[in-house]
Image (cartoon, grey):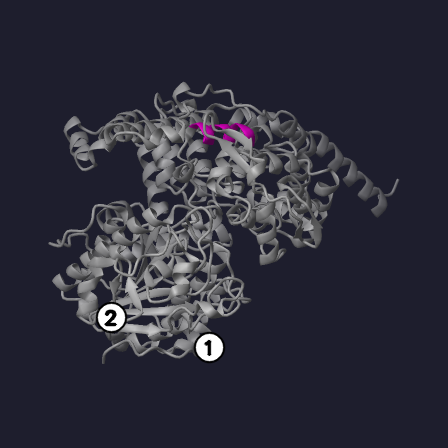
Amino acid sequence: MPTTPARLLALLLAWAGAAQAAGMGARDARHLLLRTGFDAPPAEVRATARLSRAEAVERILAGARSEARTPVPPQVLAWTDPRDLRGMSPEARKAFQQDLRARSIALKGWWVDEMVSTDSPLTERMTLFWHNHFTSSLQKVRSPALMYRQNVLLRKHALGNFGELLHAVSKDPAMLLYLDTARSRSGQPNENFAREAMELFTLGEGHYSEADVKEAARAYTGWSIDPADGAFKWRPLLHDDGVKTVLGRSGEFDGDQVLGILLAQPATAEFITAKLWREFVSPRPDRDEVRRIAARFRQSGYQIRVALRELLLSDAFWASANRDALIKSPVDLVIGTVRRYGIRYSDPLPLVFVLRHFGQDLFSPPNVRGWPGGEDWITSQTLLARKQFLERLFRADEGRMTPAAMERAVERVPEDGKPYVRRMLQAAMDLRYLPRRGESVQQARARVLDPAYQLK
Amino acid sequence: MRRRDFLAASVAALVVPRPALAQARYRRLLILVELKGGNDGLNTVVPYADQDYYELRPRLALARDAVLQLDARAGLHPALEPLMPMWRAGELAVVQGVGYADPNLSHFRSIEIWDTASASDQYLSSGWLARAFVADPAPPGFAADGVAVGGNDMGPLAGAPRAIVLNDPDQFLRQARLARPEQRSGNAALNHILRVEAEIVQAARRLSADVPLRTEFPANAFGSALRTAAQLAANRGGVAAMKVSLEGFDTHQDQAARQQRLLAELAAGLAALKSALVEIGRWDATLLMTYAEFGRRPRANDSQGTDHGTANAHFVVGGRVRGGLYGAPPDFGALDGGNLPYAVDFRSLYATALERWWGIDAARALGGRFPTLELLRA
């Protein structure tokens, strides 16, 4: 039979279908794993390569945890009634500050441990994504216990429902303190949360007016915390129960009703979808695609998995122009390297400090907008710090710090920081790549010091 | 091609470099100090003779006899005492009512407006200093056009052809040996990394870390950033502009104690910087200006703090500054939505730096003409 173009096409399609069924291949698998997790270990790449793209995406989404597996150090959970602080002697206050620092570091180390050891890296990536969206910071909240509770909340909803997450996090005690809702009251409402909820959490700039901010602020009054245990507390006497007008709707709204109004706006789904696009696909969202995916996201009642599935299966996600188009965040780089090269450590402290040095101090984003990310991760300072970290990790010689050199380094820091620096230097000396089968130190070193290693 | 590459390429092709002139102009240093979060100008430069001020801030207002009186109406917050020697020496200009039309009250949008010197409804991608350096490059022998000292945010230097972030010159030079200049590629993210790498190599070639200073700086992050700024100012490989930040001015609650601490850090830091610049003989060749995304609302909120506002007071100091009060004192009778009208467009301060300090055409960097202020001595 002569080969007609139609037959040829049919053959090609059949072949393509077979190839698809036979799996996406290692290159696609590596891309998917790196973009949805921290690293692409060879065994995972082989397993994923056998699946189709849709199968692999489904497996990643379906298998995501909603709870951490690393137990939190008990000291992190300690809550101090702020009223107890008022009467403290200067010595007691100083001891409290030191304890606060120790608990903050324990909290950060706990999250590092979880990210390094988790079997559900997408959960941690999304928890971090929401931490960077619904920002709160230890700097202002000053309670590791509340920041931990918020982290648990973000993880629980990380791949759940965005609307539920918005309602829950708005009443989360760390958030109530971070954006001053706990101090806001009828008569003179504090606008901080009302503004950021519209500008940064839902609508994005340009989709609301100053009057909307002022009115919404009245609705959130009454949301407070109980100083005895740091839990959410509704204080009806502080609530402004009058009529408010927000985005053209009027009523005796409370905070949840105003959040409902924000969720009903199409701008919210588009704003969140565009942000997810920048996290997972490319630095510049495609407007039409964002609209399409946002519509499905909204129709689904804000199921985060729906938005992620659409994004991860979009043509743009797989387009060759968007491969290696994102700059690794400090967490991507540090956690990814530790996981990929099986680097063992006994104490997460050096990693906590390295992340801070690279500009991503966990639980302490720079401001309510979070870490700007993208090209902003790379400045002369952070690029040099990244290279130095990788270079030290993959050094063939021993190059250990002598005890005398360590003491000199410790000398330079203020008294109350000395124990941490000593502990960190000690732990950092053991932090190194031990060559395993397949890759020598020199090979690994060449790979990680290549500028392309900064990309994902 | 990215906007910045395009600009750099087109300027390189069109502008005939005049290195000697550039050398002379950029020996005059510009230091910008960002008061991050939006400093409360009304409790910084206090309108202590205005009854409205006390009515708007019953518990937050500073008493007449607590302020450091500058004239019959304006007084500085007492924590700014270390600035008074500069005031008395006629080296401190206080500009009141700095802002812009149709103000935006978002931290991020408003600082973007300040950093890019845009109008309120205009979106620009590069910083105003970056555009100035594209049009009038610093001499090739300079280590960098600009340095963001401490922090990681380039601000008005974002997109500058040769700008770096640096905390500690010594550490920078030790680490810089890991940087290698490499060929550009077609990948935008990779290009960004390679460009930063090239900027490091260039700066490291021309900076020396060994700059002893006798002046002691305050033992805090702002103090050490200013020490680094002074070390860079003393370096033979020049730097034309620097940006330093002091963070924490977003005082929605319990403002009094926090602002007191921050203003004390600001004043002690600037006094130390002056002493160091005098020590190295560059005080007369330095112009320093403060800036922030906005001032704060005249009426205090119920958390003993202040919410986002508009017009603000700023400081300009330096050996050639003509001290005094500029702009207009706050007019509480003209509040718009509870916020102050502005009297001086912030781009007038930038135009003053570009035209009067460096002698370059400000219109190209600022996208228009803005009147300059007479706050420099010949």
Residue to which mark 1 is pinned: B368
In this rendering, the answer to whether A53 lies above or below B369 is: above
- The type of residue carrying mark 1 is Gly
Where is residue A69? Give x, y as percent: 51, 20
Count the labels in the image.
2
Between A233 and A381, the residue placed more toward the observer is A233
Along the horizontal axis of the image, is A33 left or right of B142? right
Residue to which mark 2 is pinned: B28
Where is residue A277? Give x, y as percent: 60, 45
Q: Chain of mark 2?
A: B
Q: Nearer the viewer, mark 2 or mark 1?
A: 1
Magenta span: chief secondary structure? helix
In this rendering, the answer to whether B148 lies above or below A366 is: below
Where is residue B125? Give x, y as percent: 49, 62
Q: Residue at x 58, y 24 (%)?
A: A65
Bin the neighbour count of mark 1 within 10 Å (Cα to Cα): few under 14, some 14-19, many 20 and up: few
Please give the range of residues in magenta: A145-154
Task: Determine the secondary structure under disc 1.
Answer: loop
Q: CA distance from mark 2 to mark 1?
A: 24 Å
Where is residue A45? Give x, y as percent: 56, 29
Q: Decide if residue A319 is in sight here.
A: no
Sequence-earlier tag: 2 or 1: 2
In this rendering, the answer to whether A368 lies above or below A83 is: below
Q: Residue at x 42, y 45 (%)?
A: A366
